[in-house]
Image (spheres, rainbow, N blue to C red):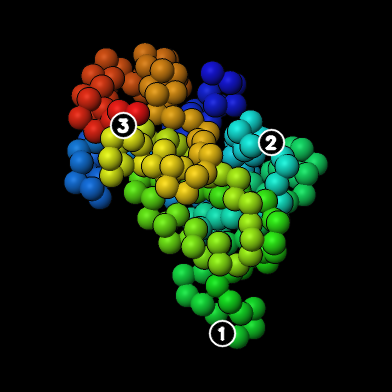
């Protein structure tokens, strides 16, 4: 596993974005882990987060693109932080763009904020996590209506590797539906492998009991392909 992925897993735990215990998800599933990207709240955290996204994007897509698009609302700071990080790490200037939930009819009008879009723009979409694909279902048509774009793919921070509507993961289903390449900074398989019985400053995060519960959870809800 690449060093930046290991660092990112530690970063999620340190930032209390990724927690282990007993959680009831919106879907009603009882989960032994929970991720809340809203816990990234400081400038230092957002700077590091943007750097990890930048490295994952470079690894998956390279830097041959023009625009980072972040679906409202959580995708907006992600797109901004990552655009800054790409400039800092690689000296590559990319634009950021996001959508509004409501169309603005005065001043900076329209459905988009940040950069405008034009024919031929190569776009990478960025999200925190994909659980149902709803935000992409809402924003992909908006993007497609703006210009003749080359949408290169979608990157998320964590692939939960759970079933979507079928047997595949929600992230994979989005990729198949829109013919997109999808990637994540890390997967839950990466997280489990790295943290299992690992001594950290806060003790062992995934011990035998948590590992057993994670395995049981994925036996029931894990993606089969």
Closer to the chain start, of discs 2 and 1, is 2
Q: Residue at x 25, y 50 (%)?
A: 26
Residue 119 x/y as whole percent: 69, 61
Q: Quadrant of residue 172?
A: top left
Placement of the C terminus among the 4 image quadrants: top left
Q: Residue at x 61, y 33 (%)?
A: 60
Report the Cα–Cα distance between label 2 and label 1: 37 Å
Residue 67 x/y as whole percent: 67, 53
Q: Which residue is mark 2?
A: 62
Identify the disc placed on residue 223. Answer: 3
Report the Cα–Cα distance between label 1 and label 3: 43 Å
In the image, residue 173 sits, relative to residue 10, either above or below, namely below
Residue 169 x/y as whole percent: 35, 36
Q: Residue at x 42, y 47 (%)?
A: 177
Q: Of residues 219 and 28, which is closer to you in this image?
A: 219
Q: Which residue is mark 1?
A: 105
Closer to the chain start, of discs 2 and 3, is 2
Mark 3 and mark 2 in contact (Cβ < 8 Å)? no
């Amino acid at each position: 596993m690449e060093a930046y992925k290991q660092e990112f897993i530690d970063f999620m735990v340190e930032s209390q974005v990724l927690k282990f215990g007993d959680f009831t998800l919106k879907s009603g599933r009882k989960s032994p882990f929970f991720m809340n990207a809203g816990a990234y709240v400081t400038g230092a955290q957002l700077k590091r987060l943007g750097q990890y996204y930048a490295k994952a994007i470079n690894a998956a897509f390279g830097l041959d693109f023009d625009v980072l698009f972040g679906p409202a609302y959580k995708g907006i700071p992600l797109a901004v932080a990552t655009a800054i990080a790409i400039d800092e790490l690689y000296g590559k200037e990319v634009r950021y763009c996001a959508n509004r939930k409501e169309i603005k009819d005065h001043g900076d009008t329209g459905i988009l904020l940040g950069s405008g879009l034009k024919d031929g723009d190569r776009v990478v979409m960025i999200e925190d996590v994909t659980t149902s694909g709803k935000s992409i279902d809402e924003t992909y048509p908006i993007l497609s209506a703006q210009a003749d774009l080359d949408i290169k793919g979608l990157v998320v921070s964590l692939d939960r590797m759970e079933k979507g509507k079928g047997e595949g993961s929600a992230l994979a289903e989005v990729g198949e539906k829109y013919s997109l390449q999808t990637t994540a900074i890390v997967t839950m398989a990466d997280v489990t492998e790295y943290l299992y019985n690992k001594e950290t400053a806060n003790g062992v995060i995934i011990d035998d009991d948590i590992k057993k519960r994670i395995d049981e959870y994925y036996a029931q809800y894990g993606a089969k392909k």
